Amino acid sequence: MLSGRARKRNPRADALLEVALVLFSTKGYGEVSMQEISQTSNTTYSLMYYYFKNKEDLFHTAVSHSIDKTIENYNELKEKHSSPIDLINDWLENNIEYSESLKRVVKIMLEFSEKRDGSPSVASDIDYFYKFERKLLADSIQLGVEQGVFKCKSPDETADFVSSHIDGIFYGALVRPDMNIETAMRELKVVLWRLLSYQPMAHEEV
């Protein structure tokens, strides 16, 4: 998954990417200049071009960087939980906790979608992200079926449904500022438990 010069975990480059992510997601690719990113991040113009060839290179690296961070977070959740119920619960809570940064990821993915032909590596990163997310869900559902806590004929189809619905929540939040992501995520969890014929225990938060 690592690609691009600034993907080598250089703290200064990573901080620059975070600033670029915010600017690209709030203003749009065409409205952001390298000079604005330089000024906002307190980075010299020459140092920016040491890390990145141009604005497009910076944009592509920022997209991939944000995806890498999200996947690393999901991997930490996988390592933390052995129970599929706990993993799915924590994964959905994670989407609530980091909703603002995830909205930025979704928005820059939309921005990038018009430029997919220009960077096969970033297109591959985006495809990998969705495959990883769906596999995490499908594997958790399958494990729950094997443990007898879930009932599901097609974990893959259910995972696709949940992943697509989460996309819809974040896309909706971008165009409807009054949309409550936390409420939508909790409603999705209720629907998912019903699909899996799982009845939460009294102490479990729904």
Image (cartoon, rainbow, N blue to C red):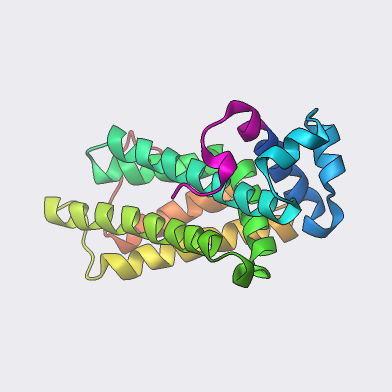
Quadrant location of the C terminus? top left
Q: Is residue 138 left or right of residue 131?
A: left
- The foreground one among 109 and 64 is 64
Q: How many marks?
A: 0
Residue segment shown in magenta:
1-15
Q: Say which quarter of the image contains residue 89.
A: top left
Q: Say which quarter of the image contains residue 15.
A: top right
Q: Is residue 206 visible?
A: no
Q: Say which quarter of the image contains residue 50.
A: top right
Residue 153 x/y as whole percent = 22, 70
- The foreground one among 14 and 206 is 14
Q: Is residue 136 left or right of residue 47?
A: left
Say if 156 sits above or below 43 in the image: below
Q: Residue at x 54, y 41 (%)?
A: 7
Residue 198 x/y as whole percent = 27, 53
Q: Residue at x 32, y 58 (%)?
A: 135
Q: Is residue 167 magenta?
A: no
Q: Residue at x 40, y 43 (%)?
A: 74
Q: Is residue 7 magenta?
A: yes
Residue 161 x/y as whole percent = 42, 67
- The foreground one among 53 and 140 is 53
Q: Residue at x 33, y 63 (%)?
A: 195
Say if 121 sits above or below 39 in the image: below
Q: Is residue 200 visible?
A: yes
Residue 65 x/y as whole percent = 56, 45
